[in-house]
């Protein structure tokens, strides 16, 4: 496993113990990193504080990624408390529930705007604010979480697929923009995992079963496997990689039939 001792990171997207971002935070903390964890709103504050307490000397801060003020505050506080930043883990995604149930053609203007704002623009907004802190450390690594629905159609994924396509393109444009600063930008594309973001999705159990049947490894993946890949992208093992989308899906994306 990567050695992140002495490294400073921020993780956005922890809601509960099932969150993929929490698995990444745990792995990063175990690898020796010091972390700032954010929570979306007061509803999640206590929960995230409880989880954060399992890591060494954590910083727990509020951040709704749709608010520029929250983002400004977050990076100001990290600057003050950490004095720099080595990595960002971005695991925020959201579309209004109705957009994931209705036909894609019925996507509303607001649903489209919200999905792309939370799930794609937020990466650009965070990268811009992380940059000066990372420059002070001689560079950095930014990792986000995506899904194959950006490239292929999955029933009901709808506008989230469009948002993930924008997210993955943003990974490449950010990688190009920040490459000269020695800041790398990559994504992990995870297979389906039971989390808050997949709870209540009609037919999710069937989706897990189709993956289990068709994936070359004939099984599903778990958050710890995604976390290990994310840690590789954060750490020095991937120092020659940027703009990459790394699949952790038991090989599902490679199969045609
Ligand atoms: P999750 O619900 O635990 O995580 C989603 C997070 O987004 C939550 O912590 C939520 O608080 C946060 N969020 C939503 N709106 C926000 C806002 N306005 N400001 C700040 N944070 C906000 O579910 P998860 O499955 O761990 O999802 C994490 C990431 O992994 C997402 O990007 C998701 O698309 C991606 N992903 C999930 C799966 C899966 O099957 N679970 C598969 C591939 C990719
Ligand atoms: C989500 C919807 C439809 C199909 C889906 C998913 N498949 C997978 C997911 C096949 C794997 C989970 N996923 C990859 C996501 O990115 C989920 C994002 C999401 C989930 C919700 C549920 C609750 C809500 N809004 C959401 N916004 C985004 O109200």
Image (cartoon, rainbow, N blue to C red):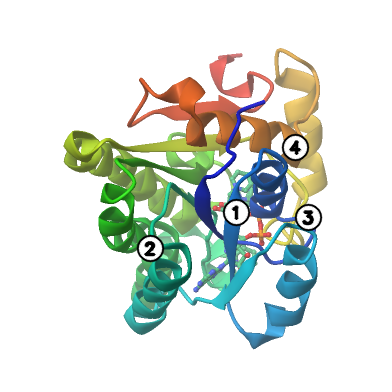
How far is mark 1 from mark 4, CA to CA? 19 Å
Q: Write down the residue under mark 1.
A: 34
Residue drawn at x 51%, y 41% as measured from the top left: 149
**Label for residue 224?**
4
Mark sitting earlier along the chain (1/4):
1
- The verdict on label 2 being within 8 Å of ligand 1 is yes
Q: The C terminus appears in which quarter of the rendering?
A: top right
Crowd class of label 2 (few under 14; some 14 to 19; many from 20; radius 10 Å): many
- Labels 3, 1: front one: 1
* Pointer 2 residue: 122
Q: Nearer the viewer, mark 2 or mark 1?
A: 1
- Residue at 66% in and 51% down: 25
Mark 3 CB lies closer than 8 A to ligand 1: yes
Q: CA distance from mark 2 to mark 1?
A: 22 Å
- Is the C-beta separation of discs 2 and 1 under 8 Å? no
Closer to the chain start, of discs 2 and 3, is 3
Mark toward the start of the polypeptide (4 vs 3): 3
Q: Do labels 4 and 3 touch, CB within 8 Å? A: no
The answer for how far apart the CA atoms under marks 3 and 1 are is 21 Å
Q: CA distance from mark 4 to mark 3?
A: 10 Å
**Could one spot residue 156 in this view of the protein?**
no
């Amino acid at each position: 496993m990567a050695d992140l001792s002495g490294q400073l990171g921020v993780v956005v997207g922890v809601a509960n113990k099932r969150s993929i971002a929490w698995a990444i935070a745990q792995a990063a903390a175990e690898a020796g990193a010091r972390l700032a964890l954010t929570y979306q709103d007061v509803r999640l504050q206590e929960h995230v504080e409880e989880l954060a307490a399992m890591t060494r000397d954590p910083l727990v801060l509020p951040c709704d990624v749709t608010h520029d003020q929250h983002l400004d505050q977050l990076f100001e506080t990290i600057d003050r408390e950490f004095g720099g930043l080595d990595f960002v883990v971005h695991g925020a995604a959201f579309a209004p529930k109705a957009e994931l149930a209705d036909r894609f053609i019925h996507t509303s203007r607001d649903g489209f705007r919200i999905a792309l704002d939370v799930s794609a623009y937020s990466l650009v907004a965070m990268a811009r604010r992380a940059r000066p802190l990372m420059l002070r450390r001689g560079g950095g690594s930014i990792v986000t979480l995506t899904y194959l629905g950006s490239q292929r159609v999955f029933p009901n994924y709808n506008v989230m697929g469009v948002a993930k396509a924008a997210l993955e393109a943003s990974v490449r444009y950010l990688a190009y923009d920040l490459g000269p600063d020695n800041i790398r930008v990559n994504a992990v594309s995870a297979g389906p995992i039971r989390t808050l973001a997949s709870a209540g999705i009609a037919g999710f159990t069937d989706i897990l079963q189709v993956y289990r049947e068709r994936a070359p490894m004939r099984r599903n993946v778990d958050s710890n496997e995604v976390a290990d890949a994310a840690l590789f992208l954060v750490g020095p093992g991937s120092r020659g990689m940027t703009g990459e989308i790394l699949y952790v899906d038991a090989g599902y994306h490679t199969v045609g039939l």
